[in-house]
């Protein structure tokens, strides 16, 4: 009986731990290629209306981006807010979906080859 109780408690602890870990994973970043870019411009304003007539404003950016080896690719992505001018972004890109996520990074976090391309 004691072994059964210990086994059940262990299984519950493992399941709760796995649940907590899976909630923290951003699946838009898993398996994505990483590119770096710098925000130049205010972005193109896109206005959409939802069913109740409410306006949703987003901003579309089309910018050159570089992988860690310095290879350039033009990326188009949208943001729900206007992004800070001259901010450096790490873009997460999937083959069939384009940019799936992004995060701001500091200049000193850029790979050397990317830093050379973005600061010149």
Image (spheres, rainbow, N blue to C red):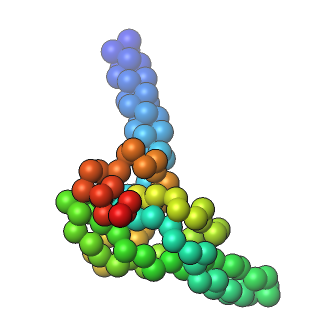
Q: Is 25 rendered above or below residue 40?
A: above
x, y percent for residue 50: 71, 85
Q: Nearer the viewer, residue 85 or 56?
A: 85
Q: Nearer the viewer, residue 64 or 31?
A: 64
**Residue in the picture at 43% in, 28% down:** 13
**Residue in the picture at 38% in, 60% down:** 119
x, y percent for residue 38: 45, 64
Whether residue 46 appears in this view of the structure is yes
x, y percent for residue 91: 40, 63
Q: Quadrant of the C terminus?
A: bottom left
Whether residue 78 appears in this view of the structure is no
**Residue in the picture at 46% in, 58% down:** 88
Q: Would you identify the image quadrant in which residue 68 lies?
A: bottom left
Q: Is 8 rendered above or below residue 100?
A: above
x, y percent for residue 31: 28, 59
**Residue in the picture at 57% in, 70% down:** 79
Q: Quadrant of the N terminus?
A: top left
Q: Would you identify the image quadrant in which residue 6 lies?
A: top left
């Amino acid at each position: 009986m004691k072994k059964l109780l210990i086994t059940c408690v262990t299984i519950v602890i493992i399941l709760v731990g796995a649940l907590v870990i899976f909630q923290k994973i951003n699946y838009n970043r898993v398996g994505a290629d990483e590119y770096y870019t710098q925000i130049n411009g205010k972005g193109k304003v896109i206005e959409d209306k939802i069913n109740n007539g409410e306006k949703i404003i987003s901003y579309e950016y089309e910018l050159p981006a570089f992988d860690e080896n310095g290879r350039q690719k033009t990326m188009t992505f949208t943001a729900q807010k206007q992004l800070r001018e001259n901010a450096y972004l790490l873009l997460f890109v999937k083959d069939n979906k384009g940019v799936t996520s992004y995060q701001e990074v500091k200049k000193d976090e850029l790979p050397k080859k990317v830093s050379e391309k973005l600061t010149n």
